Image: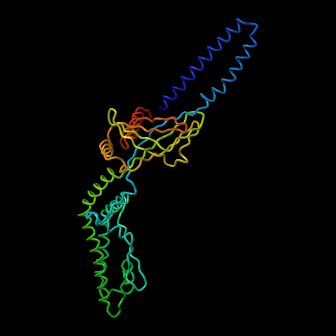
Amino acid sequence: MNKHDKNMSGSIRLAVALVIGLILGMLSYAIISKVGDYSSFIAAVVGALVALLIPIWQTYVVQQSSLALEVNGISRKVSDKAKVSLDEHSELAYLRKMKEGDNPGFFIMGHEPKRPHQDRTVSLDELEELLQRAKQELKDFPEKLADRKADMEKVNAFTAETFTKHECNKLNRPIAPEIDFNAEDVASTLKEFQQSYDERYTNIKDKYDELQSTIPEIERKVGQIRSELIENRSYFEISATLINSGRLNTSIKKPALFRVYIGKENYIDLKLTLSEFETKSEISPNSTVVGSFSSTDISQLPEEDRKLINTYWGQSVQCKLFVEDVHGEPTASNSIAFSEGLYQKIIFDRLAVVATNESM
């Protein structure tokens, strides 16, 4: 029962009660007027009945909770437990090197640098973050190349006569390991710097060329992986507003049901649980609570249900959320499309119409 139905039911009950009260009052008046000798007794009986009915009326009609449920939106997310191995896809070689660069080796005194064990599995969010970083690098490379080329040309402009220890110290800042200044053979020191700065420029140019040629393949592969994970390792998250328009607080139970209607007598049921149950389950009188309901990973559903979900996700088929309060009373939500963002778009369209008609 939705909010409109509950309000209508309450109004009907109130109207019926008023009519019954009016009829009882008229009957009481008629009886009292005809039986004058017993008027005091009858009045006392009627008063006692009224005194008895008032608390019953308040308990079972007035002092009641009235729960309504409105779905605000639905989203489909990939489980964090779903991992992608960067080693299994040759197209992701550049992203693998980026991740390895995030965990550089460490030095042990007197030994070669060692690398810790590299975990080259990532979640979809981490994979897409690596892709965005790679795309940003591609945008930044031209400026880096220009800077490296300018540095290289600056080093090449020095001669053995003009190159000093002071210049040596400045040129050592961006490179490792540093080059010692040999006052007895300045030309060889300068040559080392020229080679080092030439390598810096070449390394950046090689990375730029590699990324330019591989970024389309990376994007295609990430898109393919994203689609596969969404179809097989995703879950649904439903945002809903719980509205208690009654005068008594109420609470809902943790389990909920989300039904997708895909045809006559054909549907898919998703079992949900209320997130932050301890703080979101109780709704005070005349108040609202915005809660989030999450499904399990769809990999746990039968294969036929997974196929139906993937087929109808994003379509205009309707779906509803069902919850149950602590008294076992079920409540159904409004209907929304089984599509992410479509419900919000409908609201935006309505608001746009209002804004258009609103005078300045």
Query: Which residue appears farthest toward the bottom when viewing the image?
Result: 184
Residue drawn at the location 31% of the way across and 47% of the way down: 303
**Which corner quadrant of the image does residue 201 belong to?**
bottom left
What sort of colour scheme is used for the picture? Answer: rainbow
Count of residue discs = 0
Query: Which residue appears farthest toward the front when viewing the image?
Result: 302
**Which corner quadrant of the image does residue 13 belong to?**
top right
Against 182, is 103 above or below? above
In this view of the protein, which residue sits in the foreground, 357 or 118? 118
Quarter holding the C terminus?
A: top left
In this view of the protein, which residue sits in the foreground, 20 or 354? 20
Against 267, is 81 above or below? below
Q: Position of residue 345 (x, y in %)?
A: 38, 40
Q: Position of residue 127 (x, y in %)?
A: 34, 60
Query: Which residue appears farthest toward the top when viewing the image?
Result: 34
Against 296, is 216 above or below? below
Q: Position of residue 134 (x, y in %)?
A: 32, 63
Residue drawn at the location 68% of the way across and 10% of the way down: 29
In this view of the protein, which residue sits in the foreground, 111 or 149? 111
In this view of the protein, which residue sits in the foreground, 289 or 47? 47
Against 247, is 289 above or below? below
Q: Position of residue 54 (x, y in %)?
A: 66, 25
